[in-house]
Image: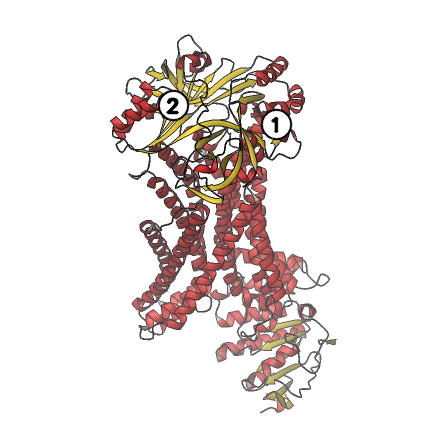
Amino acid sequence: MLEGVDLVVDEGEVVAVLGPSGSGKTTLLGLLAGLDRASAGDVSLDGVELRGLDEDARAALRAERVGFVFQSFQLISTLTALENVLVPLELLPGDRAPAAAAADARARELLARVGLAARMDHYPAQLSGGEQQRVGIARAFAPQPRLLFADEPTGNLDRETGRAVADLLFDLNREEGTTLVIVTHDLELARRANRIVRLESGRVTRIESAASAS
Amino acid sequence: MNRRFAIAMARREARSSRRRLLLYGSSMALGIAALVALQGTRNTVSDAVAQRSRSLLGADVRLESRAPFAGEGLALLADLESKALAPAARVTRFGAMLQARASGRTRLVDVQAVDPAYPFYGRVITDPPDAWSALQGEEPVALVDPSALVQLDLAPGDRLALGDLELRLLGTIRKTPGTAGLRTSVAPRVFIARRHVAATHLVEQGSLVDHHAYLRVEPEVLTPWLEANRPALDAAYVREDTVAETQRDTSRSFGALTRYLGLVGLTALLLGGIGVAAGVRVWVREKTETVAVLRSLGASSADVLVTYGLLAAGLGVAAGSLGAAAGTALQAGLPRILADWLPVDVVFRPDPIAIATGIGLGLWVTALFVAGPLYDLSRVPPLRVLRRDFEGDTTPRRGRVALVAALGVSLLAASLWQAPTWRSGLAFAAGLAGVLGVLCATSFAATTWLRRHTPRGAPFWMRQGLANLFRPRNHSLATILAIGFGLHLVATQHAVQWNVLRQIEADTRPDRPNLVLFDVQPDQKPEVDALVVSRSVPVIEEAPLVSARIARVDGRDVGDWLRADGEVSRDLRWVLRREYRLTWSATLRDTEELIDGRWWQESSIRPGEPAPVSLEEDVAATLGIGVGDTMVWDVQGVAIPSLVTSIRAVDWGRMATNFMVVFPPGVLEQAPVSHVMLLRVADDADRALLQRDLVARFSNVSALDATTILQALDAVLAQASRAVHVLSALTLATGILILLAAASASRHERTREALLLRTLGASGRFVRRVVATEAIALAAVAAAVGSLTAIAASAGIVIGLFELPYRPPWRDLSLLTLGAFALAALVGWWHGRPATQGSPLAGLRAAEIA
């Protein structure tokens, strides 16, 4: 349950939503990404008001403009790493969809970029947690989304792997110029954002610049 | 909808799910195979019948008369003969006793005395091959059905006696135009030349003889002649059979047989559909997380629906194609199984319509059973990627009702399509729906009972195993349906057959007659009585017989009635034209029950008034008359007016002297009469001896041995059950496939749980016990449900349909139940095995990749 949340994320900005378990971080992410409907209030995504959109219209909006990185990776277990990255490219609307060869090249390039050139044909179960999350990052960036939502992207990884994955996420974000919203309870990760939104019991308790966060 | 994504995704999903989906599909394939094989055979036979229609009859038209062609009948025959391409070929047909001189054995046979020109079309195949033409030589010779060789201990060249005629056996008849093998089972056929009939002295006044005239007539001449002369033929009691009628009747009767068998195939298909639904439901559940990811990445519900719809369509086409291929292979072998019913020789050829129907059925049944789960899949909310416990909309109530209605309508349509009559189609669909409903309800009740009554003091492994029956993602319903329904079908069929045969065998008990003597003439009666008494043979029943026809009903002339256009149904025509065997009796027999009117007293007959008469209920219903209506009987030229005073229900199933029409004593005694006697001769040798002596002294008297009827019935039932067994085996195999599919669908989950238990410290022995408990409990419930519903269904059929007393065949049912139980337990155990072996960690990893 969220209450009184008033938040604007600017284009190209990196915002971290920080809070303990049960504070409403994931609920906020779901609402911002159009995965969930707000019972009251408005959510606007890249200038599009979500309230009037049905489930499929919101799906079309996500396909075109939104990428996701999940805590539990959420790779499709029956697809190889390469195929997982291809999925969002194939879901792009007709005018933006690359040709099959171009999509394949883009997916391969991204997997190479995240260091998995040699593991493209492996299934998720054959990859380590860190490798799976790298596939998740490559998949998120594949359709060149305008917005990227990351839900505890390092939450399921050990500290060292988590740091490497976060580096990759921020590096790619910089290269692609994507607006990034990270939900985390890890202050160290949150500090790498431009702003930190602190959430407790469904309310925004503070919005601060990352540099000043403690 | 993003077509490119849907196709690419469906292709990728097919790669990982191919084997599982094929396993589900194969459970449907066997039912499709049965239907394709039967439809293919039906079409092939129908085509063959159409191509060889004239050889089915052996002529273009056959005229039949109970009396020798004379008067108006002969004039009509002569008129048609004058328009024919050749003189008529006559066949005289009658029942008589054939005696083998060497062994002394006798047997009631169906004598067919033929003219040289018979048949005009088609060939009679004999052994030796040239024997048919030799039949017409100077010496009296005979050809017999192969069964007569065994029954009379005969060999070609042996001497035979038929009445007063001595014959030499030439050989056997292998095939005659349009005759199915089973027709000859009770009374084997004996062919002789017609010119020798007189020498038998068996065809006398009052003998039961059919006179046939076969003619070759151009269709353009025949059709108008028949149209113009049909009333005259009816009036002369001459029946006509044309090529078109024979073709239609032949195709219809074979079609009816294959359609009845098709119902078994339809059952297997329905069972397969349930298997597909059970398997796909688990598969869809496993795909929920994948779909949630796809939805979060921007896939619309239409994208999901098309992606997985394509997979389902692939499953349907694969199952249909597999079934069509297996059915076509089965079609090649079916003529051998149905050999005795095939009216014509058929050459195997794949039937494109049957194959297309098979593939169409695969698609349709898949669509029906998969639509609900697919719809649910397309409604998976994207929020599930963040919250696993979030449930979206499932199929709305209206949608579920529509799906169930579509399923019901499809079942009904398929039953009506397959069943020979709409009534049997309706009954079949209702019965099937009822059985499935009972199985589902029983499954639910049994698992609910187990949940509430799991013994608290039982060891943990037992409680764990029993709990698996009702925990989420259990396969209890699928297993109970698969094994329960398969067992139900096989056990019901067996119990019905066992009870019917038991009843027939009951007729061979010491107090039941086992030898029937026909055509005992009044002057022979005292001598036959004396002979029977001298052998200490009890006469169980006897009755006088008088041949007669109906002349008028309630003042209406039967000839006029028959001539009335468009009013006379097939049944009524038969009832009006047939020759009746009347009898008289002062009392009701124990196979008869008075259902309307009153039985007569001695004072019932008053001179000058119509005689009282009692009618059998079906005859009265067909004629549309009841108590108080009048009838005039033509008793061999003498008119006997009568008044219907009672209606009787007759148990035709018992070996007894049963009659459609009964008069009181004092009405028919002066008419030409013969007697029928029912005897009991316990010893087989004594019975054979009595028959031999009877034939030697009274050549016109026919004796029918009840054991030969029993043997013939046994043969017919054996033939029928062979075909049903093949199809039941398909159903059972379908059940096993569903069992495998259901077990494999939940194996992933169960294996994970078992491995987790092992990781937590449970021993391999503990897990084995859990797996065994679940397998045994489920198998026990399924077997119990299947056998109990089979007892109820078979009792319903035996008591309700056959009107026979019912007793469950406990021994056979126990064996079948045990077999089904063992099978289900074995499959359950086999599928639980991986969880009990190897290291838990390796197992968990393997389960993750699978």
Q: Amino acid at mark 2?
A: Pro
Q: Quadrant of residue B676?
A: top left
Residue B777 percent coordinates (x, y): 36, 63
The residue to which callout 2 is attached is: B522
Q: Which residue is mark 1?
A: B559
Q: How many marks?
A: 2
| Neighbour tally class for label 2: few under 14, some 14-19, many 20 plus, Cα within 10 Å | some
Q: Residue at x 46, y 41 (%)?
A: B599
Q: Is residue B393 left or right of residue B528?
A: right
Counting residues from the start of the chain, the first of labels 1 and 2 encountered is 2
Q: Residue at x 51, y 16 (%)?
A: B90
Depth check: give the residue in front, A17 or B152: B152
Residue in the image at 58% along x and 89% along y: A201
The CA span between labels 1 and 2 is: 32 Å
Label at residue B238: none
Closer to the camera, A155 or B261? B261
Camera-side mark, 1 or 2: 2
State whether residue A159 appears in this view.
Answer: yes
Which quarter of the rendered picture does the C terminus of chain A lie within?
Answer: bottom right
Q: Horizontal and vertical percent for residue B206?
A: 46, 21
Above or below: residue A214 compared with residue B265 = below
Q: Pick out the residue farthest to the top.
A: B138
Q: Is residue B144 placed above or below B779 in the rendered structure?
A: above
Q: Chain of mark 2?
A: B
Is B564 drawn above or below residue B806 in the view shown? Answer: above
Name the residue type under label 1: Gly
